[in-house]
Amino acid sequence: MNFSRRQFVKGGVTAFTFGFAAPQVLCDIAFAQGVPSRNLVVVYLSGGNDSLSTVIPYRDPFYASRRPTLAVPAGNVLQIGTDSSGIELGLHPRLTGLKSIFDGGRLAIVQRTGYANQSRSHFTGYDIWGTANTTNTSGTGWLGRYLDLIAPPLDPLIAWNTVRETPRPLMARTVGVPAITSPATYAFSSPNTGAEAAFERTAQTRISSHLPVDRPHVAFVNSTTQAALGTLDRVATVATYRAAVTYPNNGFGQALTAVAGAMNKQIGTKVFWVQTGGFDTHAAQGANAGAYVNLMATLGDGLKAFYDDLNSQGLLNNTVVLVYSEFGRRITENGSAGTDHGAGGNMMLLGGLVRGGIYGTAPNLSMDPSNPTLENNNADVKWETDFRGVYAKIVDSWLGSNSVTVLGADYRAGAPNVL
Amino acid sequence: MSIDAVIDRLLNYESLSTDHDSKIGQPEYAGITTQAGQPFSPNTLINDARQRWLFRMIHSQRPLEEKMALFWHNHFATAYSKLAGAVGQERATRLMDNDPSSLAGSEPGMIQKLRQFATGSFPGMLLAMAKDPAMVYWLDSQLNTRTRPQENFGREIMELFSLGIGNYTEQDVYTAARVFTGFNWQVIGDRASTTQSYYSFLYRPADHDTNAKEFTFPIYPDGGKVIPARAAANGEQDALDFILALARNPATGRRLATRLYKFFVNETAEPDQALISSLSNAYLGNNYSIKAVLRTLFDSPQFRDPRNFHQRYSWPAEFVVRAIKETGWTGFTVNSAMTPMTNMGQQLFEPPDVNGWELGPGWISTSSMLARMNFSSTLAANQRFNLARDAQPYRQTPERVLEYALSRFRTMGFTTPQTNSMIEYLRSTAWTGADAQLQQRVPGLTRLIVGSGEYQFV
């Protein structure tokens, strides 16, 4: 599933429009500077990932008893050692690629991330993670606010969304983010050819340059057209990128190929948005075979190919990949050999400068009423690290911005030292 | 016809013909393209089902019926791909859009039910959806049993289909799941044949939770919040009680009123709360009839206020249908709109999730605008000779050609600098008005208008 329905940021269309329609001349600034800059790749697992199947506390006796069909046998997990509370952990057996990155010290796992009174709704949960606000989820996204703080003029490819809809985290007040689902099909067609086609493109560019202040929605559409026409040619160069490594032949692999291509062609993009779905595993989740194994294959193989690609290009130190989902899932499996909506989950970061390792503590899955690591009558994992602490670390230590401004509050104290 | 007569005809369409499907394949209508070596199979092949629906949207004499079917498809958003993964493409297509006349005994597909209830009783539609086999599988009801309740459907019927978030508790979600325990599906007909069998609703009493179920909001008119314990054989009554309670809840009335207002009047500004109240009251006071809401809405001054015209972003299906109707369809197959619609972000029968599509500005991104522009290009190229011929009477000057084009393709209006840019385009090289020039520039102008921002609003 793909969760990104959103109302438009209220009142933001007007201001937004003009940022989006930055003239082409100014757009080339970042490109002309040509400095390979740090970037962030956000990978969103839509549907609510069952974190307990990704990073498994395989010795916990309640893990097997509460998940009679879903538990991965201790002998099958990819052992990664113990966390600070001494709980032994293993990655899902299909995450061999991530295991090798972990062993190389470049994968950080932050356990039990979330927030108080975690929402079990996909949509509210997605918005809370997107806005970094647990009470008002109608505003801009945290990455959008980061973009809003960058001094203009901004290159229209400052951020790059690989799905069709602008995701909530990238919704900004003054910066529009292009949606480029496939560089190869991001092109302008015409009923005519040659000079006649060029006349049309010129005319479409002129007609869409009309951005009426009193009609903000038309202005928004026209500015989007301007952004499309203004980025076509550079995106076309990304379409020529041929990776030296083989990416999995699925949507996630293709999106990551485009991201690597944009880095290779020095587009200058600072934030990429990638997502992969299917994590809403209410039924027939599988653990040792089936749906969840396929999800882990897609995730792990895609990230490993991307990591190897950047490594071979010497770009690994420019990139941090953040992986998250809107909630973890219920601990006890349901009657459909699946899991229902839960609470706390894991975040993962990887990249050349990431301090790899296990952060935070795993939940204790015991049904003891005094168990402090669970909530909802011991049904769900209780959060330990506020997810905004991880955001704060990324904003301050990686993107070089100000997390207090971007997140609207100070979450630095709770930030794990992943960067 | 006066506006009132037009609205009457639009709303009271029950007496109008439904022979649109019989027009498929006739030369004066938009075309369809069958899969290689296959007859047109809209009940068993999803791409053909998509073509049939698009054809209806273009040619139906009951435009409101199709508009509402699309509206409800988004409201009860269910995706074909999950069904196809479970039961194969033929039976999954029947689940989505089966015409019962195509197979003896078969029941209407989900979209056909939505069409049937399009302007009818909302609780009737809610119940039809709860018992719709496509919905059963989409939200895992067939796995929801008394020993292992599964909350997927119980949550979404409150969050998305009726009350809206904030009007129920997590505990209500768990309780709602128990209400629907025992709801299941079964295959009927020749099981060995994927085309001669179909799915139907099945209630399994043995799986039903017979205990009393207490909610935090009223279930019964007397304010009672507890669905009483019942024998398993009568367990379906739980769902009837619960669905009626959801339909009766004022939160549902306001939510439907707001959604219909945004769909038909204006989604770019906050709705007038007084109107929302009267729409909601029309719903609550007329046996939860959607037609009563629409009647009140269409009679409202807000509906007829020009300031509310062109204040909604067209959905890709609407954009494509309008573009085809205004540009022409002779020799155009609706199959050519399939990939473009996917690129615009709306593949019929394939909403992204149970919450439906992201509406409003959510439709618009750089890639979706390219898809809209490029579809206008495809269509204009296809209709090149018709467009040029139609413009011949105005060939004396570019200004007259433009004036003609702007009367044919309706938008909220362009500014003088924009129309000047169109004139400049028509004069890209010296204007001759000759056929060859018309055949290049009139399609070019068509794509500029249909692909413009100003054309994207309805």
Image: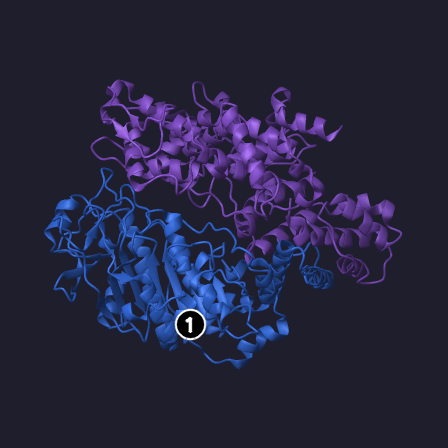
Q: Is residue A118 left or right of residue B56?
A: left
Alpha-carbon neighbours of circle 1 within 10 Å: few (<14), some, or many (≥20)? many
**Chain seen in blue:** A
Q: How many marks?
A: 1
What quarter of the picture does the C terminus of chain B occupy?
Answer: top right
Going 57% across and 43% down the picture, which residue do you hit? Answer: B271
Does A46 sit above or below residue B335?
Answer: below
Q: Colour of chain B?
A: purple
Q: Amino acid at mark 1?
A: Asn
Residue at x 63% of width, y 56% of height: A216
Q: Position of residue A223 (x, y in %)?
A: 62, 61
Write down the chain letter for disc 1: A
Q: Callout 1: helix, strand or loop?
A: strand
Q: Is residue B255 above or below residue A385?
A: above
Q: Nearer the viewer, residue A328 or A71?
A: A328
Residue B36 in view, yes or no:
no
Pointer 1 residue:
A39
Query: Would you identify the image quadrant in which residue A77 lies?
Result: bottom left
Residue B455 in the image, given as x and y percentages of width and height: 67, 49
Image quarter (top left, top right, bottom left or bottom right) of the N terminus of chain B = top right
Q: Is residue A208 left or right of residue B188?
A: right
Hey, which residue is sitting farthest right in the picture?
B396
Residue A141: image quadrant is: bottom left
State the image coordinates of residue A8 (x, y, percent, origin top left).
52, 53
User: Is A64 situated above or below B231?
Assistant: below
Say whether residue B324 is visible: yes
Towards the viewer: A257 or B2: B2
Q: Residue at x 59, y 49 (%)?
A: B268
